[in-house]
Image: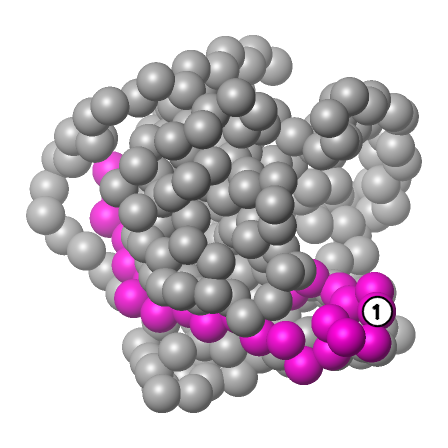
Amino acid sequence: MFLTVINSCKNKPSVQDDTWQYLFDGKTLNGWKVLNEGDSESAVQPDFFIEDSMIVCNTIMESEGGYLVTDKSYDNFILEFDVKTDTSLNSGIQCRGRIWEKDTSTVYLAGDAAGTKSEVRWPAGYVWGYQVEIDPSPRAWSGGLYEPGNRGWLVRLIGNVPAQKAFRPMNWNHFRIEMNGNIIKTWVNDVPVVDTTDDMTSSGFFGIQFHKAYYEWQKDKKTYWKNIRIKEL
């Protein structure tokens, strides 16, 4: 695998055509399904529902967390969506998501200031893949590149002040993601955040993350998603 980080991207990606496809019809969750984070059959299903042409994710205490994922896999694309959170719980969207077929150990880079590394064993059935973060916390790493279930943080936003200021907590935010071959780029509200290359994954599903609640005050907090569209490259 090969990873190069460049945080000075200034131009939006070129595209090969003008064909956009909406992944959510505003009325149903056709084409989507729920996956628990560890694919546990006994776990409580994450709470996703539709309201005012939006996908709403409601935080519940009993769930282990998980994803609302597309039935279809995608290779090279530009993905755009609008998202709003009413909670300090982070969220994110899986791109080229996958599931471990067998127990797998990897070296995981944590999101602390020290960048702690540790070996982690992921059970068969665990969801992993590139995840573009939605991070309303003071850390402010929205648009950063994370890989849950595998290597952890691939692109952190330490020192990237313009990117850290791009996300507007408690308001609507526009995300744009390009994955074309091993090129990965992200924007938050038209501010460039990530410009990197990585060869780990070339295809997989999209997945809206449902983050588990750790404390009672986090219960019934919601994340709202709309205008989810893709242009395949």
Instruction: Give the residue at x 21% y 30%.
Output: 13
Q: Residue at coordinates 57% horizontally, 49% vertically from top-left?
A: 135
User: In x, y percent, where is residue 172?
Assistant: 36, 64
- The verdict on residue 220 being magenta is yes
Residue stretch rendered in magenta on the structure: 210-233
Instruction: Please state the horizontal and vertical placement of residue 141, each as a whole percent of the image.
Output: 55, 39
How is the model colour-coded? one colour
Tell whether 23 sits left or right of 152: left
User: Which residue is more in the foreground, 232 or 139?
Assistant: 139
Question: Where the N terminus falls, by quadrant?
Answer: top right
Q: Is 38 above or below relative to 180?
A: below
Residue 105 painted magenta: no
Query: The C terminus appears in which quarter of the rendering?
Result: top left
| Residue 49 visible in the current orientation | yes
Instruction: Report the residue at 16% width, 30% height from top.
Output: 14
Task: Report x, y in % for residue 76.
Answer: 34, 37
Name the foreground residue: 3 vs 82: 82
Q: In this rendering, does residue 41 appear at all?
A: no
Q: Secondary structure at mark 1?
A: loop
